[in-house]
Image (cartoon, rainbow, N blue to C red):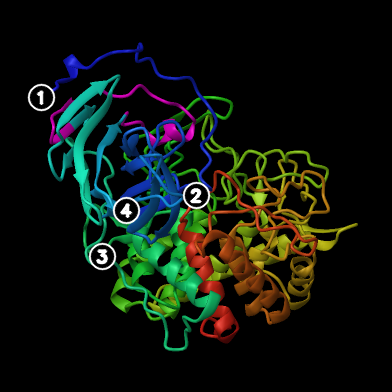
Amino acid sequence: MLIPPSAVVKKRSGDPMPHGKQPALHELTTTLCAPNIALSSPSGQISRGDGTGLYRQDRRSLAHAAFGVGAAELVPVGSAAGTGHTRFQGLVRGHGDTTPDVGLHYVHDRTLTADAMRETWTLHNVSTESVTVTVTLNAATDLARMDQVKGGEQPALLDPSATEAEAAWKLDDCEVRLRLGSAADSVSVTDGDITWSWRVELEAAAARAFSFEVEQHETEQGGFLPKRPEPAVGLPLPEAASLEGDHGRLLRRSLADLDGLQLSDDGTPGTAFLAAGSPWFLTLFGRDSLLAARLLLPLSTDLAASTLRVLAARQGTKHDPDTEEQPGKIPHEQRRVAIDMDGENPLRLPPLYYGTIDATPLWVCLLHDAWRAGMAESEVRELLPALRAALEWVRGPGDADGDGFLEYSGSAGAGLSNQGWKDSGDGVRWADGTIATRPLALCEVQGYAYEAAIGGAAVLAAFGEDASTFREWAADLRERFRASFWLDDEHGRYPAIALDGDKRPVSGPTSNMAHLLGTGLLDAHEAELVAEQLGGPALNSGYGLRTLSAQVRGFNPFSYHCGSIWPHDTAIAVLGLASEGFHEQARALAEGLVHAGPAFDFRLPELFGGTDRGAGDAVSAYPSSCTPQAWAAAGATAVVGYLQGWNDPASER
């Protein structure tokens, strides 16, 4: 029986629900094989209204997918989550139970590939008697855009075309098809929600499996449609690596997630990169993809080389205020469609957006480090024009007012107001809690710029090109930074997070100063002062590095950038401290981060709460944190490598 969209029973108007809050993600189970992501409750069910769903190419392919057994209660008892596969197990309680022990169990297997999701739900009768049950599967979709889901919107469900064996939905240029493993006895559609039913007789000790597969297709191939690279870039561990204990569990989980996060430029060979994270950022991000590849250099230069190529192909060539493109500038992110979020914090970004102050120098830094680590000379040579263009941007358009520092004013309209890695609206604030006014010159960006100028010049010189101008610029920057950024107040002597619009150093110790270590911008005494700050209890929570000192107003351990812990930030601090010889502080931060691993089943999230281990506080989740996140997994890998001795940046200096 075919149920066309026109025959669907209507019980509501179909108008979209109003804006809500960003969904909490910390209790959801993520299964990943980019570009597909499945988020579900710990029971395995995908339920409308809580952020769960199957996502692909910034669309929600499925908004509802749930098995049931009559009116019985499904009680989850455990799950084993991998990257591309998750198994959920549970009990079916309330279906004729005659003893305290439940006689019906279920096993729910979810498998993701780069093209599809397959669900297999197996009902086991472990009782001594036969049973007759009705098994149902409900499915629905709204094909909501990712920015709608993130903004808490609930668009109306789409009307499907459904039969006893399959269903289809279509919106704009996206089409979703669901195929059952075996045809149902009946099918009905109410208010966009499909119900398939099977009447099942199960003998004692028997089992019956039900399955479906779902795919999303884009009927128009325009725009950015990244695909999984074939083959994926390998990240082999060195022989010195140990997979024992918590180190091993953290390594295995992180490397599996890094494999699942790999995408490529439309499947083109040699264009693999790491998508930033699940679910909101499963696409190309300049800063995130670069930093993750840099943290993984001890394992692979191939990922670095392909990431550099993908971003160089999008390097700016003109001035465009709408996208913030400038000649030589490396982009911030690329998606298939524009972001258009309303509400209290509106955000509107074009599909290819250049609103970042740090991606360009970070691109140069990665090229230099990959070259030093053994990237093929031919691959480096083909990127020399992009290198020179990037360096010219650093000492040209990157310094908009000509004061010798890289700064940003923020996007016009509803773009990103802050354009460093702390890109929330309140991410840069004074010690009294006041938000700093733009334009802002971030301290870490000056470190990246110095390192880029010195490292980029070394690459150019090695290939016979003149690079003296960039070395001279870097030497001047070092002196300018020393004269302008340092503060001496009740918190000690430390570099400010930024210079504000009036060129004043913004007070209050932050984690940003950690990014200066190892760049060459600081002298030995200045590096020691930074190490003292990072090693103190105001910034070192015992579980990692806080983004903002606990001693200043505005500190909030559950804020996005003002007191939380970001694993990649901690990893950068660990490697920076080690590169300067401060191994006591480096080891303390590294061991704290590893200690947090079990609380997240060794899948470190984008960020978590900056709670105080010394005071007995538990490791605490940040509810809307993305998991997995590329630079979190890469940071965990780098930190374990440092603790095990196979990733020691001090040996490279």
Name the amino acid type tagged 2.
Cys
User: Which residue is label 4 attached to?
Assistant: 127
* Element carrying mark 3: loop
Pick the quarter of the image with the N terminus: top left
- Asked whether the residues under the numbered discs 1 and 4 touch, taking CB atoms below 8 Å apart as contact, a structural biologist would say no
User: Which residue is label 3 attached to?
Assistant: 270
Pick the quarter of the image with the C terminus: bottom right
Ranked by sequence position, the earlier of labels 1 and 4 is 1
- In 3D space, how far apart are the residues under numbered discs 4 and 2 (Cα atoms)? 41 Å
- In 3D space, how far apart are the residues under numbered discs 3 and 2 (Cα atoms)? 27 Å
Name the amino acid type tagged 3.
Gly
Query: Callout 4: few (<14), some (14-19), or many (20+) C-alpha neighbours within 10 Å?
Result: some
Q: Give the residue at the far left of this rendering.
A: 1
In terms of depth relative to the viewer, which is nearer, 160 or 450?
160
Ranked by sequence position, the earlier of labels 3 and 1 is 1
Query: Callout 1: few (<14), some (14-19), or many (20+) C-alpha neighbours within 10 Å?
Result: some
- In 3D space, how far apart are the residues under numbered discs 1 and 4 (Cα atoms)? 38 Å
User: Which residue is label 1 attached to?
Assistant: 2
* Element carrying mark 1: loop
Q: Which mark is residue 626?
A: 2
- Asked whether the residues under the numbered discs 3 and 2 touch, taking CB atoms below 8 Å apart as contact, a structural biologist would say no
In terms of depth relative to the viewer, which is nearer, 45 or 542?
45
Picture coordinates of residue 345, whole percent (x, y): 57, 30
Ranked by sequence position, the earlier of labels 4 and 3 is 4
Picture coordinates of residue 333, whole percent (x, y): 42, 46
Which residues, given as a range, are shown in magenta? 142-167
Q: Residue at x 65, y 41 (%)?
A: 439
